[in-house]
Image (cartoon, rainbow, N blue to C red):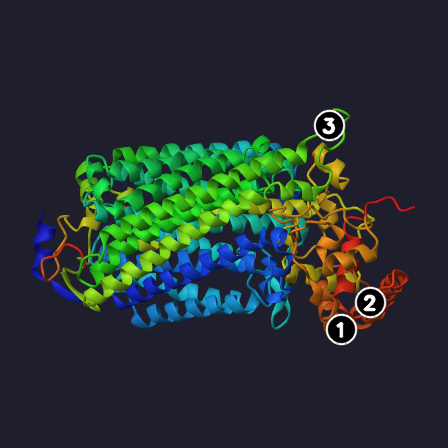
Amino acid sequence: MSENVTQTQNLETFYYDNRIVRAFGWATILWGLVGMLVGLIIAFQLYVPAYFPSLDLGIEYITFSRLRPLHTNAVIFAFVGNCIFMGVYHSLQRLTKARMYNDFMSWFHFWGWQSIIVAAAITLPLGITQSKEYAELEWPIDLAIAVVWVVFGINLLMTLIKRRERHMYVAIWFYIASWITVTVLHVFNSLELPYDWFHSYPVYAGVQDALVQWWYGHNAVAFFLTTPYLGLMYYYLPKAADRPVYSYKLSIIHFWSLIFLYIWAGPHHLLYSSLPDWAQSLGTVFSVMLIAPSWGGMLNGLLTLRGAWDKVREDPILKFMVVAITAYGMATFEGPMLSIKSINALSHFTDWTISHVHVGALGWNGFLTFGILYWLIPKLYKTDLWSKKLANAHFWIGFMGIILYAAPLYWAGVTQGLMWKQFTADGMLQYPNFLETVLQLVPMYVMRSLGGALYLFGVVLMGVNIYKTVKSGSFEANTEAKAAPLAAEYKSKSGLKHRWLERKPVPMFIATFVVIFVGGAFEIVPMYLIESNVPTITNVKPYTPLELHGRDIYVSEGCYTCHSQLVRPFRSEVERYGEYSKAGEFIYDRPFQWGSKRTGPDLHRVGGKYPHSWHYYHMIEPSKMSPGSLMPRYPWLAEKSIDLDMTDNKIGAMIALGVPYPKDYDKIANEDLMKQAQQIVDELKQSNINIDKDKQLVALIAYLQRLGTDIKVKE
Amino acid sequence: MFKHLLDNVQYIHLFPIFTLILFVAFFVGLTWIVVKLDKKYINEVANLPLEKSEYAVLTNNGEQNG
């Protein structure tokens, strides 16, 4: 090829930046350990109170409901996030034959991202949260994420523009798609109106908020936990196996179909909810179709090893990768199955979901990360892995950990799902007491935590192995490489084809954006439709100032991590909780609080079900009112006061968002607040409970007693 | 105006069918393009991570990876 000859004549010498790769690598291991440790702690918290009630120390910063978002954020954005960046910064330089565009940007990205993680680790235990799953961080951190993410994007794009390799390998497309989609998701799901330095209300309410949140939540899984990792798979698996990917053509189909389909599937998180039926069906159909590209990718990965399976027996790196890809296949088969309404009716709100995501997180993300680390770190240190034996031990311990984690939770999920729906011959609920269905699961929770502990132990072994490897080698901060610059003009003989796209980063960015935008737009469309589609219910009125304070406490404490506020239209749920939830009931809910898991009962119809005194005692000592309860104690709610100075900010923000409070109500809201608080305090006094009007618990009781009562016929 | 058009939801039942057709068309077009790609090129790109393609230049110490 004549062009090739000219290229080799003027070689440029340049250096790959390994320091940034190493930094992200260390961050991956560190945050992995932290995130998994927090996961293990909350796994213990789910059953320890059943055996040792005194171990619930009543410390607000370490309750399950505040730590659970810390666990998910740490694992997704800190562990997986740093691994993505490690892999991107390493593979992108080599695939483009260019150093990263700008070292300052690389390090800004690194330190910016770590600061965001630290900010999350501080604010979430403090109860500063938006309560949107995987998007809990408050608005100042949201802004910081946007800045750091854009810097990463510019660095990525500019590296592509000044690259020396004409074609962009498929891994790079996955990186591009991930960057673009996460940008779009983050912007739309973070549209919020701040009412002070650390708090905000979302611009969407109720059903719309739920739809946008799960459009985001689903695609956080898709474009943060999946597509970047597929990029890593397409680079590191061929590297580790020393053979090209099985079918490059299949990888092209895999890429475009996957990003096209993924973005539509969000509503499968909202089946049987108050979301319009057609949107639910759309989510289901696209979820089922997702099996095809997902499995195309999985098979492409596994078949890459065709003829090299003997290596898998020897090499722990390939073992990790094979299990990772298999876990990807299992999770992407299970996901669509769980999106089928009849299966979802059983699985949703149970531990089945938790098991499903952990097959993905522990198997796919975790094991691929470990495989890449074991491959990459020795290369950076120009040495061999310290102990292959220890890596093999890690593999088997981790593998057993996954089995021991997932199997009991599947069992738990099905058990609880069936118990919720079980009727007696007389047509009564067989297990009317919700707690009974939870206590049944305690042995499974114990086993799950053992599985998690095993898995974490494996990661510790990896830490030791990598530490020893590092000690035995010498780090190469910059790797020298030579390549010819791209010829300025290059005319394709074959005209406008896919190849053209692969050579041009900017059109590739645009094409990817268009593909994900089509799906995104179709999903966002319902948001506009819903406004006119949601039947307004005249009885549904905005929250009173006291209830609003109470609601914000509910959000801040993370009650949604265990309690849903969505009664699905099933006979079993209507029997247990009351009338099923209507879309029109949520129009003042900012943020929506439907939840995704019921470790405790649904609360949408809890208003008026118990006297104030019941709630008081229940929050102070849950097991007093429900013997055997696994719920943490919340004694500080009776001691801490609500910030009355905030009332006008809160009401003002709500008015700005279109909530129909009377004109200038924000100025006089505290008067109403005090009146309502006085009523509650008076009623509590009749049960010999003395509490001040401004305590958080009073506001929370006001909110809980309001829940779901708007459409009740008042006597 | 866009919002106004969408307010009219009487054909909403066609929405999923339309999106399904959209994807099938996208998929068929994509497959057509991919099937027609030539083998030599595919082979070259597939080998990029291994740095064994025509354009690849080894690093200074002769290792294939950086």
Characterize the local packing of mark 2: few (<14), some (14-19) or many (20 or more) Cα atoms within 10 angstroms.
Answer: many
Q: Residue at left 61%, top 62%?
A: A192
In the rendered view, would you say A387 is above or below A100? above
The chain letter under disc 2 is A
> Could you say which is closer to the camera, residue A20 or residue A307?
A307
> How far separated are the C-alphas under marks 3 and 2?
45 Å
3 and 2 marks in contact (CB < 8 Å): no
Looking at the rendered structure, the kind of residue marked 1 is: Leu
How many C-alpha atoms fall within 10 Å of the one at disc 3: few (<14), some, or many (≥20)?
few
Rounded to the nearest angstrom, the CA distance separating label 1 from label 3 is 50 Å
Q: Are marks 2 and 1 in contact (CB under 8 Å)?
A: yes
Q: Is residue A225 left or right of residue A165?
A: right
Q: Which mark is residue A644?
A: 1
Indicate the position of residue A455 as horizontal and vertical percent values.
40, 51
Q: Chain of mark 1?
A: A
Marks 1 and 3 share the same chain: yes
Other residues around mark 1 within 10 Å, as few (<14) / some (14–19) / many (≥20): some
Label disc, if present, on residue A424 of the rendered structure: 3
Identified at 43% across, 35% down, the residue is A291
Residue at point 82%, 69% (across, down): A693
Left or right side of A99 for A663: right
Image coords of residue A386 (percent x, y): 22, 58
Report whether residue A511 is seen. no
Q: Which label belongs to residue A673?
A: 2
Q: Secondary structure at mark 3?
A: loop
Q: Amino acid at mark 2?
A: Leu
On screen, residue A420 above or below A95: above
Between A534 and A576, the one lying in front of the other is A576
Of circles 3 and 2, the one toward us is: 3
